[in-house]
Image (tube, coloured by chain):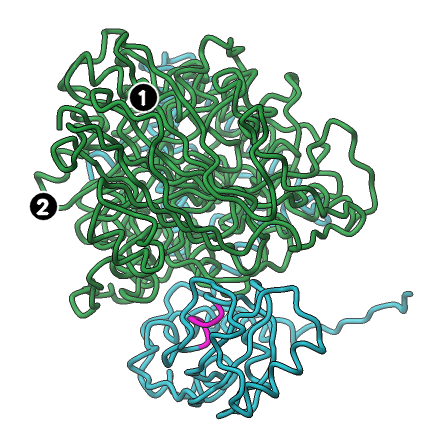
Amino acid sequence: MHKLLKEPLVHFLAGAVLIFAYFWLSGASRDPSSYAINITASDIDRIAADAMRTSKRLPTHDEISALIDQNIREEILYREALRLGLEDGDAIIKRRLANKMRSLNNADIGEPSDRELEEFIAQNPKQYQDSYRYAFNQIYIGRSSTKQQQQKWLNGLRHGNIKPDDIRVSLSLDSQQKLADEADIRRKFGKNFIDSLHQLETHQWTGPIESGFGQHFIAIYEKQAVVHKIDDIRQRVTNDWRAAQIEHNEKIAFDELAKHYAIEIAPFK
Amino acid sequence: MKKSAQYIAVALGVLAIAGCGSTDKAKDSGHVENSEYPEQVYWGDTHVHTDNSIDAFGFGNRLNTEAAMRFAKGEPVTSTKGVEAQLSQPLDFIVIADHAAALGATKALYNAPRIALLGNEFLLRWYDMMHESEAGSLRVTAELIDGAAKGTLPDSFTDQESQAERVGELWAEHGNIIERYNEPGKFTAFMGFEYTPMPSGDNLHRVVMFRDNAEKATQVIPFSSQQSLDVEDLWAYMNAYEKKTGGQMLSIPHNSNVSNGQMFAMNKFDGSPIDAAYAKTRALREPIIEVTQIKGDSETHPFLSPNDEFASYGVAGWDKYNLSATKPMPESSYAGSYAREALKRGLLLESQTGTNPYKFGVIGSSDTHTSLADVREKNFIGKHTGNEPNVKERALMPQNLGTREGRFGWHYLSSGYAGVWATSNTREAIFDAMMRREVYATTGPRMQVRFFGGFDYSADDISNLVPNGYAKGVPMGGDIKARDGKARIGKAPTFLISALMDPESANLDRVQIVKGWIDSNGQTNEKIYNIVWGGDRKIGSDGKLPAVGNTVDLTKGTWRNDIGAAELLAFWQDPDFAADQNAFYYARVLEIPTPTWPVYDSIKYGFTLGDDVIKIQQERAYTSPIWYNAKG
């Protein structure tokens, strides 16, 4: 608390909060359009403390007096500006206030229940369920074979008169890929490979399909659709849910406000 | 105080999105199984700045830690400037390394009610500039960096005591987010920060990271350069943390290239010569360095390595002036600025003090200030929010740091990542791998590189390289000692190396081993050996391997993988070994030539790059060294 009191930013903010709190709590609502300006003892303390921050010494009476004048001057000009409606159409003020409104809507989101998470998964099936695990054998044949050669090899593999090792080009990739999910396979073979894998027939030599390394003949011997259990992906879903919630809250709050407005837009190209 | 803190949180609107929900229990990684030896390389970025960094926010970054996490995990995130960004492959781990100095201060200033700042003309001016326009915000950031270099920042940005409360709350909130995204076995989020000392603009920055969960890490607040510019005070802070919590920390120096010779100096911060105590502490606290990142590459310099035809990578724009471009850096300073020379200096200091202070491994990381850790050339998000891809000619524009001295957008590299050979994807396993230096650096592509050293390998071991590598010797980062082998009877150390291309990047040109040693006259030396390469090439009479060729099409931003090789494997024995001379060996793996990021920008926007702009490069990986100790 002691340190907090010495922190200028906190100090400024606390001062601001007090002012706001005063308006809210007192109900006295100092009307910004009024012509009364009351510099209280605590205002003066704040002004003096701020001055000390900058100059590292106690401000003199004259300096405090000058700072008070500056405050009053700014307050008067501020109120006059409001009276003249100068804030209207000021892009900076507009953006600042709009941002403040946005952050009001997401103060506390809380923790989701299992039910909420399950609903969220059900609403976003693509994000969580559209994946497979694969186990397959692969033969890497490099980059330089012709289509004709590949067709000949595939026939040979299927009829058993070509053995995988006869045509395999050496590369430090497992020739037998144990059951792995898409992310693992994508990591090993690159992004495009997995898309091709989805298209292949299973339980026989097919291909070749292309990875970042070159061409591979593939024999998928297991293909499993992945059904996630909530406990396996709880953390990920919770984070996704939270992000969605923030977006949702902002939208709800905005729509609630927006419905009071009649909006017309002139046609444009 | 609790109450006022809440009001402030609401008033600031800063912490709202971070979520004030129930604190997550620290998840324990006990259930994650560790493999017997590292089977997989884990990819990460240890150096990501979010909107909590004073300069990142000033540059316009409005993406928080949460956005940085989601992006690193592979989810699509819209950058501050509206660029739809997504990693082609997720990362496995991340360290958010926001500047400890004035942590969160520009954000707090920006979001403060203006009325609260009326008494402080200095802050008020910055406040107004930041709100006035993006250009104003950039000017504030330039002043901040300049002020930090000159030590003229206002109290509220520098005085640690007065910052402690604000930073404490922000750090605790940050810890909550980190815990929420840390998933042992799947994705590792580390607690960390950046310590940013910059005396006279000479860069002595470190990323500092914790092995522990947020509950432990938040028992201290980040140590800032405003507390001390002397790195020994950082180490003392780390030591105190470990004593207090039973936890563990390490520190990662970066951008030695703009340190004006100070990062790997022969003396301590106070100018006295490095002694055994300093050497020991440094080796313990700083087991790895970040050798490549957006602000250039620090492996070596053509001045230091005139016989190395690949020494100039990532040097342009960064070797003339220090970080803040306030001081020119003479060639005589380079020896203290680049990693290879530092490894050699380490051998020298070891001969003088008995301990090698510069016995470090290497990683790469981005140092992005956009919250988005993507270093693919094709989708370079930018160094900071002021040069995101929406800025058409960002490659040609002068930059805030060192404009007058000719630092331009294209000098930024779209580099680096850290590869870590760990036994699982957990904080403990990854951190421990860093401590034993079983890590390597890449300039972006995720090639898989293994490197083993010992006295007992033979060419036959290649066929089962990894198990044999671990069984008969040590991996990268390790030590081989004379007594382990038959060095006494003159047998030279042997090495196994494998390099597999990134399947989403380019073929490999070659693998080299860089050897450094100290001879009987106490002089340090270096030599580069081409070990294995793609295609049908012969080493020429000048000892050099001919270039691999070039398939880059600058009009399309493409290359063809029909030169080079998808994988390179080798056994190698040092032909110049002297058993009584300490040495280190590290591997460098080069890709075939590919386009740099400005080429993709020029194609996208249809403008022309000048002749001075580097358009074709060979991306690369550097492994941590293996050290040979003659007296070991």
Chain corresponding to cyan in the figure: A
Q: Residue at x 49, y 72 (%)?
A: A249
Q: Is residue A135 left or right of residue B4?
A: right
Q: Residue at x 28, y 55 (%)?
A: B422
Within the image, what quadrant is residue B630 found in? top left
- The quadrant of the rendering that contains the N terminus of chain A is top left
- The quadrant of the rendering that contains the C terminus of chain A is bottom right
* Residue at which label 2 appears: B246
Chain corresponding to green in the figure: B
Frontmost residue, B255 versus B444: B444
Within the image, what quadrant is residue A9 found in? top left
* Residue at which label 1 appears: B517
Frontmost residue, B225 versus B269: B269
Can I make out residue B155 in this image? no
Q: Secondary structure at mark 2?
A: loop
Crowding near pointer 1: few (<14 within 10 Å), some, many (20+)?
many
Q: Chain of mark 1?
A: B
On the same chain, marks 1 and 2? The answer is yes
Can I make out residue B12 in this image? yes
